[in-house]
Image (spheres, rainbow, N blue to C red):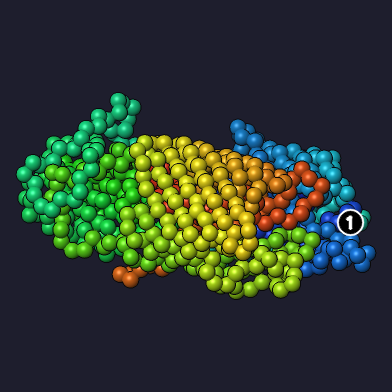
Amino acid sequence: MASTPLMAATTDNQSFYGFTGLINIPNAYVADFGSLHTQYNNQLEYRADVVDGHNFTINTGVFEGLEVGGKIASVSIHDNLFHESAKGNSQIRDLSFNAKYQLPFIPKNWFSLAVGAQDIGGAANNYKAYYAVATKRLGNFDLTLGAGTTDNLTNRLDGAFAGVQWHATEWLSITAEHNGEATSSGLKLHVPSKWLSNQLAISLAANYYDHKQSEDDVYFGINFKYQLNKPEHKSFRPIKPAPQLAPQPKPHITPIISDSNSSGPKAPQLKNKPTLLKSKQVKHTATDSELEQTAMAFKAALLDDGFENIHVGYSLSSVHVIIENHVFNQNELDAIGLILGRLQAHFNYPGMDFNLVLQKLEVPQIQISGQLDDYRGFIQSGTAPNLAITNRVNIQHGGLTWVNFGSTNSPYYTPRLTLSPDIVKGVATELGVLDYSLALKAQLEVPIWQGGSINVTGTQGIATSDDFKDNKPFTRFRHKDGLTSLTYKQNWQLPFNIHNQTQIGYYYEFTNYLGFKHQSMWMSESGRHQISAQLGYFDYQDFDGDKTIYNTSYQYNLSEYDISLSASVGKFFNKDSGYKLTSKFWFGDTSLDVYYLDTKGRFVGIGLTVPLTPRKDYATSYGVIKGKHNWRERIQTRVGESHNNVAFGLGQLPFDDTTIETELFNQSRLSESYIQHHLPRLREVYKTYAK
């Protein structure tokens, strides 16, 4: 049975326990791909009782058919459990993780089937449960039947459970269920979507719980759903296959041939020659003067866009662009899309090739070549362009006329200020549900020469919870006001596409250090594989001692699915040795990662990385002011142990937000594979900003 619009809008309702479902039991649906749910409710399971407490849940659809989430359960928000225990008052404060997978290959008009787990591998396992569940849709009703096993003393999900949810209207649904031990009925009210933004949904829930050990009869909750896939990403129009992309031998790659009589200023020439897709025969009749005027207008447009270090060269058959992007910091694809879009619009001459080289402080990042007629067809009709993309950049300057009119907009000695919040926190500890130190972080970068820059970082405290104040348990981990790092950073490239980065200087991480960190990274030409090695030494300035770090990692990028899988092993900054396994899922320019860490203890965690800056940052002739494009927060819990002791800073490396992957490779998304699988974005950004 096909779903109605009403039903389609309500399949990922959240239960009170951090998974999709009715209120007390799961159903066989999963969270929508790219959706992030957060919820608060007061229905707390404590031992064999159901009491008025606090549940905070989070749940997200990491890809089609799989959701992962977590729950914080606590009797109180601020009580110190050590003090309460000494008084004879027993409480619970628990952090747990959930997962549910909807089995594929079952026709939707039959039924949906899913398997799931609650409180996976935690230290205390207060809510551990495993279940299988089926849901059948009949009209505006969802019928759910399942079975499970649990360690939960309330016996919820112990044995068979069942429920029905009636979607009475677009804004109201009614539930009735038996969870294996007790019955309940409830209401869910959905705030009309026209009252909210396209990315936000809000719902309220009330549950009448007929449990023999229930302290109250009625419990309440509120749920927020945020769509991580932004509207502009969801509205990308699929590209049409190009005729030349039909199955056939790969196009022949040949060096570009430039006019021998071209004149004009020449930039330094590298020993390697670029390669371009072989162009069609030149058909235009434009003169050299007309091409020069076109190149000047094109360069002026790029200057107005805020790009830097701009070099434009041309011949009768081709146009070359060497350029740097410091304004589209969420995703370098936006810069590429706008540059190529302007290129095809300005050089509207039949039969010309193009060659674009993107750099960062004159360190090559990627090279894209193709035919302007072909790319113009992509912009106008959405037909896939035939592009040659490589990170083995070869730059040719000879045989071209280079535009020497106007500024190139040098990136050097132009300050770049990044502002972002910074949080040190303890989540669901014996001291409180959330303890925190919140500060404003300012990072100033001043490029001084090729690949090199001076970097200054400072923090200013804004607020702290009681446990981070003077003479309290977390005082040592509170933010320091003032300078936290002063370093020199150098990026450079070696043969065989090996990139290097060295940072040296002063660094603060709960105490003062002088030291250095070096990273070397290799990425395959397609962008599928990358290998990185890091080595560092840090000397304590407050007392006698030092730290040595060494770490090796491998990452496999599945660009067509926006997923990356990575493993790292070595010695981390806080003298903890071991390994870390990570799966990262991208939703536009936001990512969610699920990881397992085994160093001084074993942990599972979820991290969320979001851009806290506009799609295009604010740039002036005096510098750039921006937010952090890869701001990350995470929560984690111990697994396989009998305790859940607090651990700060395990599995971390210094300067982890300014690595080669971040600075030069667009968070590992600047590659042939990634660009080919995200071509619609190139077209969309040009149509958005070329006004």
Q: Which quarter of the image is occupied by the N terminus?
A: top right
Going by the numbered disc 1, the residue's amino acid type is Asp
Relative to 502, is 599 on the left or the right?
right
* Residue 642 image point, x, y percent: 82, 47
* Residue 151 image point, x, y percent: 85, 44
Q: Is residue 319 visible?
A: no
Relative to 158, is 552 on the left or the right?
left
Q: Residue at x 49, y 41 (%)?
A: 532
* Residue 63 image point, x, y percent: 57, 43
Q: Which residue is mark 1?
A: 49
Camera-nearest residue between 115 and 422: 422
Q: Residue at x 81, y 66 (%)?
A: 80
Q: Residue furthest front?
A: 544
**How busy is the neighbourhood of tag 1: few (under 14 within 10 Å), some, or many (20 plus)?**
some
Q: How many marks?
A: 1
Q: Residue at x 9, y 46 (%)?
A: 262
Q: Residue at x 44, y 62 (%)?
A: 455
